[in-house]
């Protein structure tokens, strides 16, 4: 039976938040989540074994442990979960994965924060804009933390869009953070805005993003191939926000 | 379990009518339904969670609420429901969506009005023709409201055709309004004819369409990309009426 | 549950025959069946709601009633049913439709006459040849009515081939009438041969085909687009007979 | 329920053999089986109604009976069954057909002889080589009849390969005869070798193949189109043996 | 019911190991496993009858026995199983085959060693590097036998990746051996490294690989076509390890 498979010790949590890091436009969600896992030294907690996920095995340099490509990490101290994905999600799997992940989130009573880039011309000047949307009883959370709602109609697609769709259908509380990001390149600056202005205040954690900003060029290079792949896949596969008129 | 998910408070209705706004040729059904929702200040009532619908999330500018792309709105005062769709329906989903929506309509005892464009050369002179068809015990409704039956054989395809097919198969009462519309461009004039000459008398409501006519050019521009998409999809996906000899 | 949905009043019949009119090469079966429905003023009796049929709705000029594209008509006086199809059957639906229709025919104890064209060079001289094949206990019917058996090995494909296949597998009595017909154009002359020399004697009815012959040119024009479509589809979709060596 | 449908009278048999004639490289199995049915005047015994088989109907010149395209013939006198196929088997059907036919063979306790060509340069000089392979307790049968085992590693694909695979998986006794045959053209000489040196001794029958050899040119012409089709289909669809290194 | 079908006598084993030989980059796993079966004179033990495996039949030159393409061999003396595959695994079958094989391995309590090549520039100088990864309680085994963990992040795809994924999801003990190998050609040297430095110490067997090294050129030629095929298939089908940034 597919689902979320516990791989570490059980943890006690109070009112936990989950940060979702499926790859999408500008890789903003993935870069932010990967940074969180590393900076907060989160522990491998569970593997995501949903229908349609790539049946591959990943490993880290210097570590001999083979792991599934989509995993959940935990920091008991920060009351925080992070969903890390080392693989793109095929368009045929978006729906089953969203159902499967949502089922576990709802069952555990976790508040999810879904992350998406909004393709924007980024000339390096100024900081990317951050917007928030919400479902269920989380709509007031945005105002509490001074996160703006989007100025124009839009649509979120890809795994993130499907997860928000599931939450909206079930009227389950969830948050969606949308950041202006590069259409073509990995965008560590945008990821740092997600972390500093969205995730940190909402999840009530403190997170140092200087590394993301300092090593921006290096990260961009290392991730370039992945980002290019994300650009080539259809809008069903790659998480992104777009003005609604572009989608229809 | 898929179906129609209640998202607002329950309403009391007497003999309600539903206006269907899936996108099709000239976007006439969508433009008419969107206008109705706005003008009558209808309330978000339910989300449509049928198999095959796009798993995306939409939001409105200035509003932080994420919603599914196909929704039902209600006006208790006007005894009226409106089905609003912010996404095209893939051809593989037409059948399951028609079954799913029909099931709910029949269960609730709602009288549906399905809307379709009939591609016509429109040179701007004269008003587009409006025709009506019906299933079950609604066949006399057309004559009561002086709505002409079509002068030649025809076929309605796309989501609207599938909904009418379901009603015909089950001998359930329904109405189909067909309006001459542009083949290529969004056609707010045709949508206004649907509203004024078809929907308003049948549903016994009064609706001001001056905005649609005044802002026709603006609407056409804003919707152009969507209309172009509708043109490219197969006839199974885009709701339209055609002379029968063109279909076969 | 799919199947045949009664749409008119029940009828009493003794030993009824059904004429099948799915579109195929030269549109011979469709033209013959359409003519029969009109000339004998047959009544709309049931809709065919089998899996895989196009989910569209058709209507007649001057009549406001929306109907499914495949329907069964009846003439109680002539002990006759006619299956009229206003749509081509996709290759993926041929099998399910044949099973579904055969189930109803067998349950009702109806003797089916299936119709197919055999692509032939037709230079306008002489009348097209008519051949008959049969399954179950209908093999003697052909000789009784002086209908020749085919002179060479052949195969019938498309919906008609699938219906004959089902009858042969179940050893259920059925007749197949094969007429030489144009490969490319609608062939009202061939349809009139089917009616006069095959259907009329076997079903014991009298049918005036002068209209088909007189208006041949007009019919050809009106149906040309449909016939061209039939030519383009694969041999699985379009009913036709062919020499066996052409099929293998 | 799919399966083998009895179409003729029941027969009594002792230790029957079945010769399989699905089309493949050089059409060797089909030509041999067709010849057997005709020469031994075998009777139509059953139709093969397995999932995935073409839903068409075939007929013989001068005979008005419509039949399914894959049929089993019987000769009670020779304790022999023959599976005749008038249609190629699509690659998607190879597995279901092999399961379905194997189920019936095992249930009836029939010993099957599966036939395959091995593409070989054939310059007309010398007779094609015949090799035998076997599963279950039939491995000794080959030596008893002086049939050589193949000199090099190989693989049998297509319907014949799938039937042998099923027998090997179930450890059910079966024989596979492999004959060097033309890669491109129908090869009646190779079929005659199958009959004279393989089928006749194993099934203990006497069969005159002079007709196959005398009319070789005529058969080649008549079957050329079919053989060309077999060449074009993938190796999953067309029964053939190949050196293993060519397959991998 | 699919699964592993016993084809030889039952064996008694203590703490058995299974070497997996599905084809992949450089054919390293297949060459190593084929060598093991031959050198240790392992016996045909079971056939692998999982959904999605090619339904073909293979045979060895000089041996008349038809066998399925994927088989398990056993050496009771060495407490060893080997999975030999004579066919590539289609991408659609990777998941079902991994589930099916894993189910049997876990049920029998066997420790699997999965084998993969890591495409590397190989100029003939120096010996290819060998790395090990593990799941469940086998992580310490690598250090015990002085097998290095990989120096950089990576991903294993294809059948081997899916088998490791299954083991990781179920936290079942397994080992993965990864060897630098030619991207384009069969690589018997890399296979010999797998055998000598990985398989032999872990499975506690002694194996002579001189034949692989001596006949390297010959093996390369014979296997070239297969290796080329492996290169053409997608990364889902061909087992291989890659740096993680290449995969994403």
Image (tube, coloured by chain):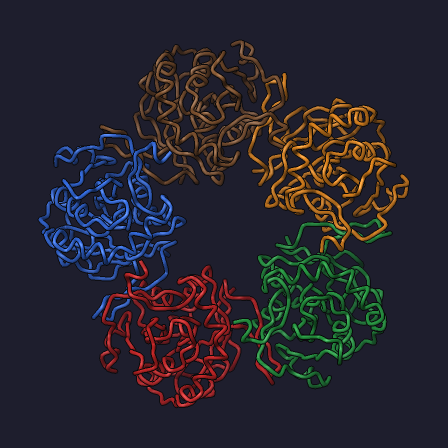
Chain colours: A blue, B brown, C orange, D green, E red
Indicate the position of residue C22 as horizontal and vertical percent values: 69, 37
Indicate the position of residue D10 as horizontal and vertical percent values: 78, 61
Instruction: Determine which quarter of the picture holds residue E246.
Output: bottom left
Q: Would you say E59 lies left or right of E92 here? A: right
Instruction: Determine which quarter of the picture holds residue E153.
Output: bottom left
Question: Which residue is pictured at 32% across the width and 66% down the height?
Answer: E242
Indicate the position of residue A66 as horizontal and vertical percent values: 28, 67
Q: How many numbered marks are there?
A: 0
Residue E142 shows in this picture: yes
Indicate the position of residue C13 as horizontal and vertical percent values: 77, 30
Q: Would you say A82 lies left or right of B44 here? A: left
Instruction: Determine which quarter of the picture holds residue E200.
Output: bottom left
Along the line of sight, which residue is nearer the eye, D20 or B179? Answer: B179
Q: Would you say B17 lies left or right of C160 here? A: left
In this rendering, is residue E131 above or below A95? below
In this rendering, is residue C72 above or below B216? below
């Amino acid at each position: 039976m597919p689902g979320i498979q516990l791989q570490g010790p059980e943890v006690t949590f109070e009112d936990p938040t989950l940060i979702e890091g499926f790859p999408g436009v500008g890789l903003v969600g993935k870069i932010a989540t990967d940074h969180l896992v590393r900076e907060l030294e989160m522990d491998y907690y569970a593997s995501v074994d949903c229908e349609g996920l790539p049946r591959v095995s990943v490993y880290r340099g210097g570590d001999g442990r083979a792991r599934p490509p989509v995993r959940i990490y935990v920091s008991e101290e920060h009351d925080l979960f992070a969903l890390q994905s080392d693989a793109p999600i095929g368009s045929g799997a978006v729906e089953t994965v969203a159902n499967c992940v949502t089922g576990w989130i709802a069952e555990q009573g976790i508040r999810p924060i879904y992350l998406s880039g909004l393709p924007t011309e980024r000339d390096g000047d100024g900081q990317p804009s951050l917007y928030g949307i919400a479902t269920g009883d989380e709509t007031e959370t945005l105002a509490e933390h001074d996160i703006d709602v989007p100025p124009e109609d839009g649509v979120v697609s890809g795994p993130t869009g499907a997860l928000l769709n599931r939450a909206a259908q079930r009227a389950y509380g969830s948050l969606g953070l949308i950041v202006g990001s590069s259409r073509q390149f990995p965008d560590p600056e945008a990821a740092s805005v997600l972390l500093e202005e969205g995730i940190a205040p909402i999840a009530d954690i403190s997170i140092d993003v200087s590394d993301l900003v300092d090593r921006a060029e290096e990260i961009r290079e290392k991730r370039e191939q992945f980002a290019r792949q994300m650009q080539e896949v259809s809008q069903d596969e790659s998480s992104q926000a777009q003005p609604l008129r572009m989608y229809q």
